[in-house]
């Protein structure tokens, strides 16, 4: 299992875990994080935008041009922003820290 720590916009740390190969979006949703993922990982929205801790960012497979284009539409983007639907968990990511932007909300969970 790969351990993930989500940091909410309130600064609360939420521990979660997923299997190698799981998408970060699915792990976040299972942990109750407010990420909608409207397009179900097809990179047609930016509702799963997260900010990766700086020390973990370079361990990720680089974002594709399509992902970069979708991030241009997300609110609160930073240098270490990514779409969580595009991050596949690996052993190298065990312990990763991920911040949920304050602009995130899941309209399906009202």
Image: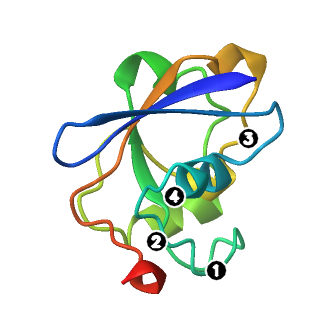
- Nearer the camera: disc 3 or disc 4: 3
Tell me if 85 is positioned left or right of 110 in this view.
right
- Mark 2–mark 4 Cα distance, whole angstroms, equals 14 Å
Q: Residues within 10 Å of mark 2 (few under 14, many from 20)?
A: many
Residue located at (83% from left, 38% from top): 21
Res 88 label: 3
Q: Earlier in the sequence, mark 2 or mark 1?
A: 1
Check the image and name the residue furthest to the left: 10
Q: Mark 2 sits on what residue?
A: 47
Q: Is mark 4 on a helix, strand or loop?
A: helix
Quadrant occupied by the N terminus:
top right
- Nearer the camera: disc 2 or disc 4: 2
Residue located at (46% from left, 64% from top): 35
Tell me if 66 is positioned left or right of 46 in this view.
right
Q: How crowded is mark 4: few (under 14 residues within 10 Å), some or many (20 or more)?
A: some
- Mark 1–mark 4 Cα distance, whole angstroms, equals 16 Å
Quarter of the rendering containing residue 73? bottom left
Q: Mark 4 sits on what residue?
A: 68
Tell me if 16 is positioned left or right of 89 in this view.
left
Q: Mark 1 sits on what residue?
A: 39
Q: Earlier in the sequence, mark 3 or mark 4?
A: 4
Q: Is mark 1 on a helix, strand or loop?
A: loop
- Mark 2–mark 1 Cα distance, whole angstroms, equals 8 Å
For the residues labelled 3 and 2, say whether their Cβ atoms are less than 8 Å apart. Answer: no
Quarter of the rendering containing residue 103? bottom left
Instruction: Indicate whether 47 appears above or below 87.
Output: below
Q: Provide residue 38's location: percent of width, then percent of height.
A: 57, 80
- Mark 3–mark 2 Cα distance, whole angstroms, equals 17 Å
Residue located at (24% from left, 37% from top): 12
- Nearer the camera: disc 1 or disc 4: 1
Quarter of the rendering containing residue 8? top left
For the residues labelled 2 and 1, say whether their Cβ atoms are less than 8 Å apart. Answer: yes
């Amino acid at each position: 299992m790969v351990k993930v720590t989500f940091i909410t916009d309130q600064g609360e740390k939420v521990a979660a875990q997923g299997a190698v190969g799981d998408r970060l979006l699915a792990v976040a949703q299972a942990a109750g994080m407010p990420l909608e993922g409207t397009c179900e990982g097809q990179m047609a929205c930016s509702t799963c935008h997260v900010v990766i801790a700086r020390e973990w960012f370079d361990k990720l497979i680089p974002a594709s041009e399509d992902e970069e284009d979708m991030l241009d539409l997300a609110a609160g983007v930073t240098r270490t922003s990514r779409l969580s639907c595009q991050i596949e968990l690996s052993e190298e990511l065990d312990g990763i820290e991920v911040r949920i932007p304050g602009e995130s909300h899941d309209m399906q969970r009202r």
